Amino acid sequence: MRWKWLIVLPLCCLLTSCAAFGGGPTYEIVYELKGETAGSTPTSGSAEPGGDRYTIALVPKSTDNPYFKVANDGAQEAGDDLGVEVLYQGPRTADAAGQAKTIEALADAGVDLIAVSANDPDLLAPALRRAREKGIKVVTWDSDASANARDFFINMADPETLGRHLMDTLASHTGQSGEFAVLTGALSAANLNEWIKWIRVQREQYYPGMKLAEVAPTDDDPQKAYAAAKQLLEEHPNLAGIIGNSSIATPAAAQAVQEAGKAGEIKVVGLSTPVLIGPYLRDGSAQMATLWSPKRLGYLTVALAKQYLDGTLPENGQYVRNVGSIRVNGDTVIMGEPLDFTKENVGQYDF
């Protein structure tokens, strides 16, 4: 069998491809240079202004994380465009208990909808269910919670495509051999664990010459991420590469590699924003970073939340202004596909 995933990127993105090698079926990601055009026509069900003024609460994993700050920029823009109030509230650092308290306070305040990026799907479930019992609609975005505690999940990219792609990216820079580590966020985060699952699957299927030495948590804290990266280098002196599984983890890994004088020797790839990873791509401490637009994700979350409050669920193929066409699979929305950043193209992006 031959699998293909179609990645649709804006015209300014670098055309790249990566193919897995080894026994068994061939896996590849195919990039096609297509993008939303100014003439795109919204389909029925587009999220547009109109109706009552609602209060929508956007709850990130941590309010101080630059990734979530950019997502909030998009959410606030959507709020202005669609005539809804958007609250941005949550713990300063990634903390599930702090998120639960935030959700309870928002439910007591009587907001219309809570959109949460869950640090721990099981720990947050009781607070989310209590909010729903009060008549408050609940959706998740970025990182899912238990399905019985929310109405639908807004995902930025297909997790299988993303996880496999991260493994492919590292393998292409290490000659498909050697030990590697994954530097992740919180071990309880559903989205991060799903990506790690597909990293493992891709390695097992296509890269027998590579060995996963360790998955190290960072709790999405920059200082913890840097310390964990340094510890990986000390405990695994033969590392060929590190995959950063969160926007904070990848630059932390690159900084540790740079300071150890091993830039280019230990390959660093993973998830991060262009602003955070840019300096490390330019000096060779990191080789490639992958992400989506967090601003677009924030915009989409508020647009679909407003539409849901108006009584309409997301539809497969629906066009959302300022975002593009979305996919819907069951109770999960897929915003689009990830972008790759290298030293050649990272300067084209400002988030």
Image (cartoon, rainbow, N blue to C red):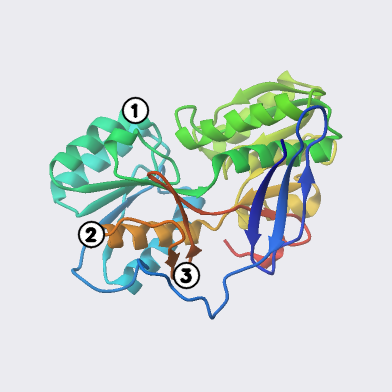
Residue at 76%, 60% in the rendered image:
15
Give the quarter of the figure containing the C terminus: bottom right
- Horizontal side of 170 relative to 187 (left or right) equals right
Q: Nearer the viewer, mark 2 or mark 1?
A: 2
Residue at 21%, 71% in the rendered image:
51
Q: Nearer the viewer, residue 304 or 56?
A: 304
Residue 9: name its quadrant.
Answer: bottom right
Q: Is residue 134 above or below residue 298?
A: above
Q: Position of residue 106 (x, y in %)?
A: 21, 47
Q: Are marks 2 and 1 in contact (CB under 8 Å)?
A: no
Residue at 82%, 34% in the rendered image:
21
Q: CA distance from mark 2 to mark 3?
A: 21 Å
Q: Is residue 348 above or below residue 151?
A: below
Q: CA distance from mark 2 to mark 1?
A: 28 Å
Q: Position of residue 10 (x, y in %)?
A: 64, 66
Q: Mark 3 highlights which residue?
A: 322
Q: Mark 1 highlights which residue?
A: 122
Q: Nearer the viewer, residue 151 or 132?
A: 151
Q: Are marks 3 and 1 in contact (CB under 8 Å)?
A: no
The mark nearer the N terminus, 2 or 3, is 2
Q: CA distance from mark 3 to mark 1?
A: 33 Å
- Can residue 86 be seen in this snapshot? no
Q: Mark 2 highlights which residue?
A: 311
Amino acid type, mark 2: Gly
Give the quarter of the figure containing the N terminus: top right
Secondary-structure class at tag 3: loop
Q: Nearer the viewer, residue 307 or 240?
A: 307
- Horizontal side of 137 relative to 233 (left or right) equals left
Furthest residue to the bottom? Answer: 39
Residue 161: name its quadrant.
Answer: top right
Secondary-structure class at tag 1: helix
